[in-house]
Amino acid sequence: MYLRFLAYFMLFCASLQSYAQGFSMNKLPLDNWDLGNWKQVESVSNPFSKKAAVIAGNNFLFANTTGKMTSKLTTADAKVRFDFMLGNNSEAIFYVQGKHAILLSNIRPSGAIITKDGGLKLPNQNANRTAGLWQTLELTFSEAAFGNALILEKVTLNDVLIHQGYVLPSEGKNEGPIVFENKAGSVAIKDFEYLKYSKETPLKLSGLSYKLYETYDWDKQFAKKKTMPNDSGVAEELTKDFGVGLSRFLLVFKGTLEVEKDGSYSLIADYAGKGAVSVDGKELLPMIDESYRKPRISYVNLTKGKHAIEIQYIKVWWKPELGLFAAGPEIRPYALHSETSLPTPQAVGEISITPKNDIEMVRSFVMFDGKKRTHAISIGSSKGAHFSYDLDQAALLYAWRGDFADVTEMFHERGEPQLLESKGVRTKFSGKPSIAVLPDLNTAMPDELDAYKDLIFKGYSLDNEGLPTFKYQYSGSEISQKISPNAAGISVVIAANGGSNLYYKLAEGKTISLIEKGRYLVDNQYIILDAKAKPIIRNSKNGQEIILPLVGTISYAVSW
Amino acid sequence: MKKIFSQAVFRRAAFLLFLIVGLLGANAQNRPLVEEDFYRIVTLPVPEGVQLEVGGLAVMPDGRLGVSTRRGDVWLVSNPYMKNGTPPTYKRFASGLHESLGLAYIKGNLWATQRGEVTILKDNNADEVADEYEAFYKFPLSGNYHEYSYGPVVLPDNDMIYTLNLGWEGKGVSLSKWRGWMLKISPDGKMTPWATGLRSPAGFGALKNGDIFYTENQGDWVGSGRMTHLEKGDFAGNPSGLRWTSEEGSPLSIKPTDVPDTGEPLYEVAKRFPSIKIPAVWFPHTLMGISTADIIEDTFGGKFGPFEGQLFVGDQGHSKIMRVYLEKINGKYQGICFPFREGFQSGILRMRWGLDASMFVGMTSRGWSSTGKDEFGLQRLEWTGKMPFEMKTVKSMTDGFLIEFTQPVSKATAKALESYQVNSFTYKYHHNYGSPIINAKKLKIKGIQVSEDSMSVRLAVDSLRLGYIHELRLEGVKSSTNRPLLHTFGYYTLNNINSEAAPMDLTKYAVVEKKEVENAHDVHKMSGMSKGTNVASAKRVNEMPADWNGKVDQTLSVGTKPGLKFDVTKFQVKAGSKIRLIFNNNDDMLHNLVIVKPKTVTKVGEAAFLMGLEGEAKAYVPALDEVLFHTGLMQPESQEIIYFEAPSTPGDYTFVCTYPGHYTLMQGIIKVVK
């Protein structure tokens, strides 16, 4: 029971923690490592060949023999993040505080925790990327308040949440170095970053006074009813309680923000209604539209000493809830408000879709580069790979492995966002139309086609498994595209009938390089096609793209 | 001696006969008849795990029923009529559609409307699972959740109509093309913009003659639910869709800024600004329903009961179906709405006729709560064959109304002035959400003429007002078998007066009121829209009684939550203790809080509902002994404190909101203990 309570408590912290990520983390210099057999390298060639060519340099750390490297840095209560890459059939171990072991592997699921008895606590889902691609592990940990344990508060692998609130029994001091150990094959580590949390609370409120005004409702923009406050006085604490008895009110707090030492800090306002915060007369969080418990963060550099602070809070239709947190790069958010001013928000249970047999299709809005794609379909497969596709542009948006979809935002209450969220380890595509008529190869691929006049979506037919083939009419051509999920990723077949000067874009990225015959690395994604095919790799507005003339059929695969 | 004996025998026999007749009478006569006696609701069981949030219904000629859902599935329901007493079976025919809120069976295929597309679902290999999703027509979308798409409804000429809901950003907005419009699309995909001014047009249909009607939900520019006849180029009142009138094909050219926003009644504004199409029928908010849904016409020639040619209109929030009789005066539709059948399991969205003249009713209440408590459901409504005693039609007359009944009336009650009440009122037309009732007035009845065959009554009424809703209440009219009407009231929207009918001969049929219209003050007070918060009552004490000497034993604080809920549902108090109760209405609707005696909440709730037009002025608190204490009727975001002494008898006392439609859901218990 106690543990469960603690877990909830930590979840709550974790949700605020994510708002503190805007602070840049400290980079651990390469010379902080006691390297052992590990080498500093510039690049490694094809990870699929047994003897990858290694070029020395200072880009990352690399090992292709077994052995450990250890940091001089020690951590107790911290967040760490690093990128790693594995060769074929490789496995390494990452030790938190030199003793708690987490697997980095493409033989077993990366992120699995090796328990004391040698067993594995598996991640929520397998979020591995394929060999030769950079992956990111991030974890936040702290010493348990009840002692003799380390808590892995939150672990994400490739942006997929794989552990939360996991308690590791531990003896002795919860502090130690970071250790990587190569166990098999080859492994590379780069961009190791960290934040060490302290228990300091260098920001404090003092000398607060409040003014309470009754306000009008929404139809009058919650304006004050009178210019004179209904009530005012000294505020011992920052709390919503000064508004008791009024159904609509504005509370204005003025006082001093005492800063113990110079530094960069954040102030996080978490409330139900409307709020604004300014420091030294500068509006850090301006008054915006009302919202329910969506924490807002502002970053500010403050010098040691006293600063004037003003906090405004407007209660609208929700119950009054008001909180203000302070945080720093290495200070977890802590409350500046009174304990009772901010209750725990009501959370919503997840609604998810898991393909049990064959194929699940879901049409929904899908968020892509900050914009909603309104005519999108997502296909989930029991084979473990899934994708989202824009039917307006005949464009892949995302593909992912692992769990399929979180549809809470579609089916909870009215489902106002109407968004489907992918759940597994994901790769992103350009989201631009893949088909175009190019009079010559100097013509760029379009960013968008008119989905009502040019690229006409005709629907899809399903095969025996339930997998759709998308059909289009475009520039005198009948086009069909079928995308099949499989254990390794997705395979794509596109066919055109009629039309001329049609081209198909397989992928676009910052850089495209040939890894081995038929295998192209496009940023952090592989495009695999027939070794005999001769695709055109050319420069594009955003880097490079890989295209083929679309005559008859093109087949290729994507893995990540 | 013999005589005495025979007398005794006779007496005993008479007593027995009296007993028997009395018992029979108790069965056949004394039990009040209810809706269920005439129209039976049959629930179709839904398999566990199937989220049948009904968006569309399509009756198939092979006896199956197609159901599309908000979750994006299309189910084929076999044996939906449950004719052998066996449950129906469900097969998932299609899936992955984007909130499919419309479904139709057209020439061998199911057509489903998704948010952004009309899709023809084909089953080419006859395995009862669609294997081809043919994109028939695409609708632009902005990404706003409130951009729902509905249809198709097939017209007699095989063209189809679709409607596109406005988006919502604190008000109705047309963020993408043709939002707020009805579109007509031919079978070969040619689209004609048909009419606009629509806000939330989930329910629409065509009469047998092809005339198109749609229902509208109360909201911005819409004072109350209503039903409008849409002809090509009509503008039904919400200006947002007018944004697209410069687009090719638009049949009208007025702009959003042309529309007057004065708060006058819509009928008055339409006199100056004739582009506005006035509704044929208003459904007064909460008095009839709160969110109108589908419309269907009874074309069964009596197989569904006595209402051939009339319309049935669903209501999502009140989980009920209303009945509409339409007539054409001066070439324009108008008519009356009546209550018809309530008690459905969830919020009604779709209604379609089955093959056997029964009505399928498809429901969902997710996100918009309803009095039917289930999250979704599928039911069928059938006529039991019994004839209800109802007002069958109400027709406009030069000097009043002609009311036709389904059964003969008792002449004595039908001639009595006290049997009737007539009121009229209207709503504001403005950009605000909803409207108060305005200009309410009690009308004087001048004459009553009962027909020879007792099947109809003419009322001559003073001060008919054009464009107004006329409330007819016939509480006192009994059938010739002395039964009350199954539904005693209706609301007639009087846009035109039928001047062709000869006036009533008042020398023969005039009636005189015995006393002055005593309730007129109440009704007038209501028109001032005090919202009834000032209802004075001994059961509502807002100041602490002086003899409490400033001391309260216990303070109870209760608020409201969205979805018709109190935020606290249980209190415990000591018998006889002095209580201060703080009621915070932090919802966006009107609520009250009424404390009633144990196990009387249904009686009080129903009585509050029956208060009708007078309810609002009396805060929907019925004058019953069962009501112990109450607040006023509270505006959204207002607070009231009442003081009372807890009852001396221990028990579970219910606190309830008696605003119409709320009492079944919005309840809590004050447990009184020794």
Image: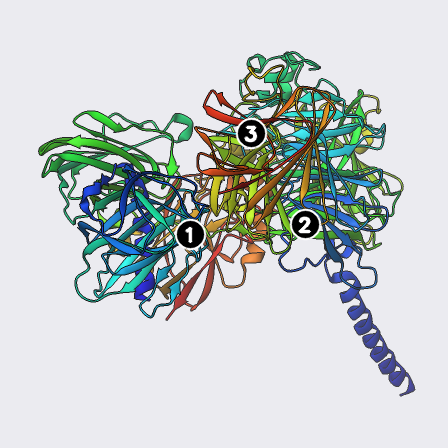
As drawn, is B345 to the left or to the right of B335?
left
Instruction: Report the number of numbered marks.
Output: 3
Drawn side of residue B457 relative to residue A205, left or right: right
- Rendered residue at 85%/43% (across/down): B454
Q: Which residue is mark 3?
A: B167
Q: Secondary structure at mark 1?
A: loop
Q: Which residue occupies the foreground of this view, B506 or B143?
A: B143
Q: CA distance from mark 2 to mark 1?
A: 27 Å
Vertical arrangement, residue B35 with respect to residue A399, above or below: below
Q: Which residue is mark 1?
A: B567
**For this view, does A551 lie left or right of residue B650?**
right
Marks 1/3 same chain: yes
Q: Which quadrant of the structure image shows residue A66?
A: bottom left
Mark 3 vs mark 2: which is more N-terminal? 3
Find residue A208 and report its horizontal and vertical position in percent.
Answer: 15, 37
Q: Please, which chain is the residue tagged with disc 3 on?
A: B
Residue situated in front as seen by the camera: B411 or B108: B108
Give the amino acid type for the residue marked by disc 3 in the picture: Gly
- Whether residue B37 is visible to the viewer of this picture, yes or no, is yes
Q: Residue A55's image quarter?
A: top left
Query: Which quadrant of the figure contains the C terminus of chain B?
Result: bottom left
Residue A198: image x %, image y %?
A: 16, 48
Q: Which residue is mark 2?
A: B342
Tell me which chain the residue with mark 1 is part of. Answer: B
Q: CA distance from mark 3 to mark 2?
A: 30 Å
Q: Are the residues flagged by discs 1 and 3 in contact, CB closer than 8 Å?
A: no
The N terminus of chain B, quarter of image: bottom right
**Disc on the earlier residue, 1 or 3:** 3
